[in-house]
Amino acid sequence: MTTTVPRRRRPGTGVDAPGRAAVGARTLRTDRWWLPPLATAVGLLAFLVYGGFRAFQRQYFFADERYLTPFYSPCVSLGCAAEPGSAHFGMFLPDNPLIPYAALSLPFLLGFRLTCYYYRKAYYRSFWLAPAACAVPEPHATYTGETRFPLILQNVHRYFFYVALLVSAINTYDAIVAFHHPTDGFVVGVGNLVLLVNVALLWCYTVSCHSCRHVMGGRLAHFSKHPVRYRLWTWVSALNTRHMLFAWVTLATLVLTDLYVALVAAGTLTDLRLIG
Amino acid sequence: MGDTRAFRVWRGDAAGGSLVDFEVEVDEGEVVLDVVHRLQATQAPDLAVRWNCKAGKCGSCSAEIDGRPRLMCMTRMSALDIGAPVTITPMRAFPVIRDLVTDVSFNDAKAREIRSFTPPPDLAPGEYRMSQVDVERSQEFRRCIECFLCQDTCHVVRDHEENKGAFAGPRFLMRVAELEMHPLDVADRVAVVQDEHGLGRCNITKCCTEVCPEGIKITDNALIPMKERVADRKYDPLVWLGRTIRRRGA
Amino acid sequence: MTETERHEYDVLVVGAGGAGLRAAIEARERGLRVAIVCKSLFGKAHTVMAEGGCAAAMGNVNENDSWQVHFRDTMRGGKFLNSWRMAELHAKEAPDRVWELESWGALFDRTEDGRIHQRNFGGHTYPRLAHVGDRTGLEIIRTLQQRIVALQQEDHAATGDYEARLRVFAECTVTELLRSDDGAIAGAFGYWRESGRFVVFSAPAVVLATGGIGKSFQVTSNSWEYTGDGHALALRAGAELVDMEFVQFHPTGMVWPPSVKGILVTEGVRGDGGVLKDSDGDRFMFGYVPAVFTGQYAESEDEADRWYDDQENNRRTPDLLPRDEVARAINTEVKEGRGSVHGGVLLDIASRMPAEEIRRRLPSMYHQFRELADVDITAEPMEVGPTCHYVMGGIDVDPDTGASGVPGLFAAGECAGGIHGSNRLGGNSLSDLLVFGRRAGLGAAGYVERLEGRPAARAEDVDAAAATALAPFDRGEAAGENPYALHADLQRSMNDLVGIIRTEAEMTAALTRLGELRERLRDVVVDGHRQYNPGWHLALDLRNMLVVGEAVATSALTRTESRGGHTRDDHPTLDPQWRHRVLRCRRRSGPQDDDPAVPPVAVEVAERDPMRADLLALFDLAELEKYYTPAELSSHPQGGSDG
Ligand SMILES: Cc1cc2nc3c(=O)[nH]c(=O)nc-3n(C[C@H](O)[C@H](O)[C@H](O)COP(=O)(O)OP(=O)(O)OC[C@H]3O[C@@H](n4cnc5c(N)ncnc54)[C@H](O)[C@@H]3O)c2cc1C
Ligand code: SF4
Ligand code: SF4
Ligand code: FES
Ligand code: FES
């Protein structure tokens, strides 16, 4: 992926370069190599469409006077006043259809995922086709990878990670205060479990981040001199092997959590109370 | 005796070549390399192929089977689609010499560009003390059998001949990582891995990891950690500030 | 014919395994210009396959270990036939060679206190094998390879040329050594595998480090490179081979599927609790404890099983008898019809420990069987049988310098003979490569430095070498022997007739067959052209395999006793009168015998050098008496029993 526009491959480059075996076919892969990038593209697009729609909908984000969907957290727009109790951190952003209620966190969350090492792989493969699958030629005439603007900016991923930690903490706070109903006091409903599972998985995704692994201990030359950080690094490394899994699972739980809150808020679903 | 299966083997040299069809007997339990050997013994005695150990240990028999970079000695016939002919071509990122044999000297050149292991000057042999936890990361990378399948599959050079000068390829970026994580190496390798060995060109799409027959997690354990170290050095103002203050203070 | 390429070096090293690379490093560090030639790519030599470890008495795990203990173990393992001087140097220098690797970047597994970890192995009194999981050979070859790159970088900094003083000629095969009129080494002749072009190296010193001979046998753990080239080159150049009758058959190689037959199953499987069973599930090894070992091994399965946990109060299982004993036992079981479906016996670890434990302790065996044989060793037994693994015999060299009888010709590694006697201990090869590789490098450097003029190769020898190499192309279609078929026949003959168990009749039959093969070799024809043509390469290797086969068979016929890697059914016991004798092979050259391509081999019985008194004193007299004649022991401090 480069800043150049994808063009038709010129003959005589890549696998057709002079000196290489003149095989002819661009790829001889016989399996359905196009399936994973296609599925990835569909999955990511579906999430973006849903997320985009919900972020700007400015409705159905707070249910049963205590469930705040992660897409609206923290709710800091003046518009949040429509749902009393939804704003835990004050209301100061103007209520404007172009400004999501969670405009403070959403851009960072988007940036966090956009610069995530896993999602980079996913969209480089599925959108840039660089490469679409292994040993399948990419369509670009030139390639400089992440050496130039804008892709060199991927290196700021760790800053998004720091912010993401903060947002995860806020989501956790949301999930905890959701146990308190303004009139009924301490209650536990299915929605609480949904929020809890979502936030737990969000932590898994955030903590399994490669930047986190680096900060915890990956940057050290001698683990033996830092036993605590080595232990932390081992844990993060174990989670890190499932980072891709968490990346997808959290997309799904985010959507499901939001949908649950939206449906309860809209009255389509009734939240089942387990306690209280 | 086993069944007869259809094979399409690329034959030719730098001047040109084509896929040639063969019908070969295949016995139970055989790997692709066995079939290639049967071809040599019965139908094509001058079919060029590299191999040594036949046990996935030496990294000689790299080729592309049905379009995928693999070791011929570790690809069992039973794992391939029964219905279709099996295609075998040489590795397609390197110049071909003949048939399934390619010129892998690109890799020797890259190996030489990496500064060698640099121990502390005052440490005598026999005095080295390293803990197991400190050597484990580099030990994973030293499992590499230099089959160069990762170099072959990496699109940075596979699809862009012009990048070969500026990009060391996954195997050798991993070698830099190995030395960088070596508990007793004193050379600074962070800036050069980006500026000279071309780490920035890697877009972490993980094909190297996918094809590595040794199962080394090249991208997760070598390339991304190196990218993080590069970010520390070159793209993180906070780390830079911290380092400067500490240096002033000391 | 294309023009022949010429190169000039001070030292030419043939072979890029552990021994060759170590020799080249040493000669280059002495300031000489060195070339390394190898048949495969750089870094693919056979050493890469070694698994278990590298023996060196560093005493990191048990501090009682010392060079004396290592020396004794080596001599015992070889049944006192070893070159004692080599065994002494080996035991003394191995630790330094291992530590030196570490300073070049090797990362061995570590002990708690950060030193190199050492593991137990058959025949070694203490934990002694430096290792990296089960890929020690890879670590060693990669380290040496990277050391060579480091030296090339130094040269580049000094001269602007990486290859100014150290160059690797990969995929280049040496087919003949070149000598001057007075018989000294002047260089070597070879061809590029890639192009088929000829190369002439002129060099006053050549170090042979070409490895073993396993490819002459049908079932072997060795790769195609092991065609005994160094043995044959040396023999043809006039050097002598010793101990060629001693070939190690590893008891456990894979037997199924056919395509992987011979691939090694590590001794670690038995060390960790695996047991051998016949087709009825009986643990047959209890019936095969030989007289010399009675009382030292468990007599019941219960006792053997207790041994794994309590080695003080129980005797070890006979599954862990020396390699030669186990290989013979398996051979008998199969011959007598109690073998497994595919002609091996069963090696069972699945029923002996939990699956998880097996996967943890034997990761590469688990992987190997799952990938190559579709066998899950945590659920089913493995089928195993003996496989040709290592040749103890080799070029006769001076222990201190690696010099052979031909001036300027040196040898080290598996192709040199002497150190391992009649049977090599596991782990002693890798250390052998390092110790004697270095010594051969030094020896060659010293020889070159002392030399007054450079010996010049005879032009007619170069022409003859080229003609021999091209002969398989020039024969008419009528000749028509296929090199692959000839190779298969040779392997079958060696396997069937000169295998684990030998008899006079078989050996004689083998020699007859080898004679026939020698005739057929004259008719070998290859298709195609010279560019990367494996059929041609095989045709040229065949003549080396034939010479080596003849050396092995003739030596085996001559030695009328059984010892270590040489078992005669018709002479089943150890004979002290044979201990002090050595069989030396040399090319026979009478006027009618002279076949320059495959010279006939003559074997001569000679006396071995008696062991130095201080070394002899390291052993108990009682032990020596089992192997030595009384007369030889008179110098032992415990008196010796002259009568
Ligand atoms: C499966 C297996 C496991 C083993 N495990 C152990 C172990 O755990 N511990 C241990 O100590 N030993 C072990 N061994 C034995 C040990 O690996 C070998 O004996 C040793 O590596 C031989 O090394 P070398 O340097 O002599 O030769 P090699 O490493 O075999 O190198 C020979 C070199 O010579 C070159 N060559 C040969 N002929 C020519 C020619 N005509 N022209 C040019 N070049 C030529 C080849 O290309 C190659 O580079 C094992 C062996 C096997 C097969
Ligand atoms: S992850 Fe990087 S080095 Fe590996 S194949 Fe992809 S681009 Fe190449
Ligand atoms: S890293 Fe893996 S794929 Fe790459 S050369 Fe090494 S073993 Fe082969
Ligand atoms: S969040 Fe995916 S790598 Fe940081
Ligand atoms: S032949 Fe050694 S890896 Fe395939």
Image (cartoon, rainbow, N blue to C red):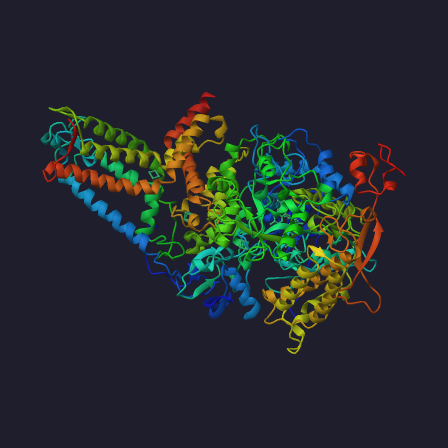
Horizontal and vertical percent position of residue C337 = 61, 57
- Residue sitting at the far right: C643
Q: Is residue B120 above or below residue C545?
A: above
Tell me if residue C586 can be seen: yes
Q: Tell me where residue A147 sits by quadrant.
A: top left
Front-lying residue, B221 or C77 = C77
Q: With A120 as the anchor, is C113 left or right in this view?
A: right
- Residue sitting at the far top: B249
Number of numbered discs: 0
Q: Residue at x 50, y 28 (%)?
A: A224
Front-lying residue, C79 or C521 = C79
Horizontal and vertical percent position of residue A120 = 33, 45
Ligand 4 positioned in quadrant: top left
Q: Tell me where residue B219 sits by quadrant.
A: top left
In the rendered view of the protein, which quadrant contains the N terminus of chain C?
A: bottom right
Q: With B188 as the anchor, is C162 left or right in this view?
A: right
Q: With C46 as the anchor, is C81 left or right in this view?
A: right
Tell me if residue B97 can be seen: no
In the rendered view of the protein, which quadrant contains the C terminus of chain C?
A: top right
Q: With A7 as the anchor, is C140 left or right in this view?
A: right
Horizontal and vertical percent position of residue A272 = 15, 34
Front-lying residue, B110 or C414 = C414
Front-lying residue, C55 or B234 = C55
Horizontal and vertical percent position of residue A217 = 43, 31
